Image (spheres, rainbow, N blue to C red):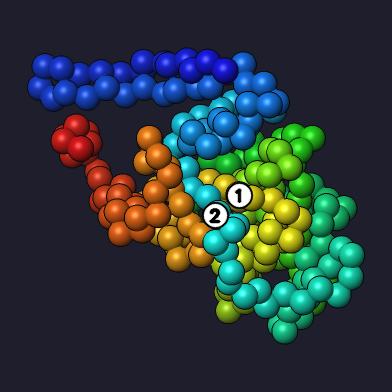
Amino acid sequence: MKIIFDHKFGAQEKTHIEHYTATLVDVRDDETDDALSQGWLTDLNSNGDYHWYQCRSTRCNLNKFSSESNFIDVGEREYINENGMFYAMNPSLDNDTTEKIYNQYCKYKGFSDLFHPEVTNWLDCDYKMVYYDNHNPIAWSKMRMYTEYAMETVLFVWDYTNPKLRVGINSLIHELHWAKGNNFKYVYMGPGYENGSIYKANIDGFEWWTGSEWSTNTVEYIRLCKRDSSTTTIEQLSNY
């Protein structure tokens, strides 16, 4: 595998800053776990092609994960909890419903449409887990099975028609239990940026990529996430 840098912007006259992106290319199948262990994750382009990007990656070390799940096994493909909410793995959820739930999620959160390529494009190693309330689909997760040891929760969306269900955190805990039960070692949980990623630090077995090593220092992680959200100018960024 090889790292390619794209130097997009720089300044040196009134402030000192370099803005660039790094992409990992030519990753062989037997190098996938190694790439993940060095902070790389994959993202899909609008044309459906994927690329490896470097980030403040987060993951759960399942050897240290022990939180209790409120989902009870009721069959080969479905789990159900005390609220009557259940899930199905890779069900036939039509594209319109998939898009509708995603759009409602973005609207509720106030997010820009940054994740649409992951909604419309799926790799052969991607799986969909759909959550239902009273047999109505209300949420779905996209899970990427990189290797027999590592998977990523690429995207989770739900329509927030009943926020009291707390589907977001419940679904993540459930998926971590599912992964551990299927002998995965790590579940990668995407980048850890801004206030919206602080909740990940509360998960048993949480680790984050500093750029040189995996850390369990949740205090520093939370500090960085808060700093992300409070940064509004290039001057601030250049002083970090």
Q: Which residue is mark 2?
A: 60
Badge 2 marks a residue whose secondary structure is: strand
Which residue is painted at 44% across and 55% down in the image? 197
Q: Amino acid at mark 1?
A: Tyr
Q: Nearer the viewer, residue 104 or 156?
A: 156
Which residue is painted at 75% across and 34% down in the image? 123
Whether residue 130 is visible, yes or no, is: yes
Query: CB of mark 1 within 8 Å of CB of mark 2?
Result: yes
Q: Quadrant of residue 121?
A: top right
Q: Position of residue 102 (x, y in %)?
A: 64, 53
Q: Amino acid at mark 2?
A: Cys
Rate crowding at label 2 as few (under 14), some (14 to 19) or many (20 or more) other CA atoms within 10 Å.
many
Rate crowding at label 1 as few (under 14), some (14 to 19) or many (20 or more) other CA atoms within 10 Å.
many
Q: Quadrant of the N terminus?
A: top right
CA gap, disc 1 to disc 2? Answer: 6 Å
Q: Position of residue 55 (x, y in %)?
A: 44, 36
Label drawn at residue 186: 1
Q: Quadrant of residue 168?
A: bottom right
Q: Nearer the viewer, residue 105 or 149?
A: 149
Drawn side of residue 68 relative to residue 145, left or right: left
